[in-house]
Image: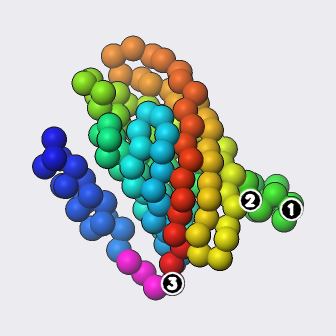
Amino acid sequence: MAKIKCISVLLLVLTCPFNSFSKQKIAVFLGSPMSGLQYQQDDLRFSLGLKDFGIAFDQTFSVAALLEKPKLAPLYVYLGAQLVDHHKHKVAVRSGIGFQQPFEQIILYAELGPSLYVVEDVDIKLEASLGIKIDF
């Protein structure tokens, strides 16, 4: 299992080239179904669950830009997929809404949204996470 985690992190870093013109963030998060590390480049985000192994890929969208209302800048929505391994591989399509509060280069955030699990049996679960991002 440790080999899979190391390979996943390596693939994650190699698939996201560091570009000085794009906004990059690294985060630590706690949540369900997984807690771990996150890497975000512009509006694409990759998550790696460390305690309970899992990987997720999401695209985020600014609510302020979608609705053309600058007052909604702290809100964003996300859409993506995840693979979680709790003794069985579970694949889900996920979406949700998030709130972020920046403090210079540190950003606190919280997310809530449903995940539709589609392998073996169909199930919908409400999942949440809290985290701290570092913007660089």
**Residue contact between numbered discs 3 and 2, judged by CB atoms under 8 Å:** no
- Tell me the number on the disc at residue 74: 2
Q: What percent of the width, then of the height, locates residue 104?
A: 65, 76
The residue lying at 54 percent from left, 53 percent from top is: 131
On screen, residue 112 versus residue 93, left or right, reads right
Q: What percent of the width, then of the height, locates residue 110?
A: 62, 48
SS at mark 1 in the image: helix
For badge 2, the amino acid type reads: Pro
Q: Is residue 20 magenta?
A: yes
Query: Where 40 sits versus 50, above or below?
Result: below
Q: What percent of the width, then of the height, locates residue 90?
A: 34, 27
For badge 1, the amino acid type reads: Lys
Segment colored magenta = 18-22
Q: What percent of the width, then of the height, locates residue 35?
A: 42, 44
- Tell me the number on the disc at residue 21: 3
Q: Earlier in the sequence, mark 1 or mark 3?
A: 3
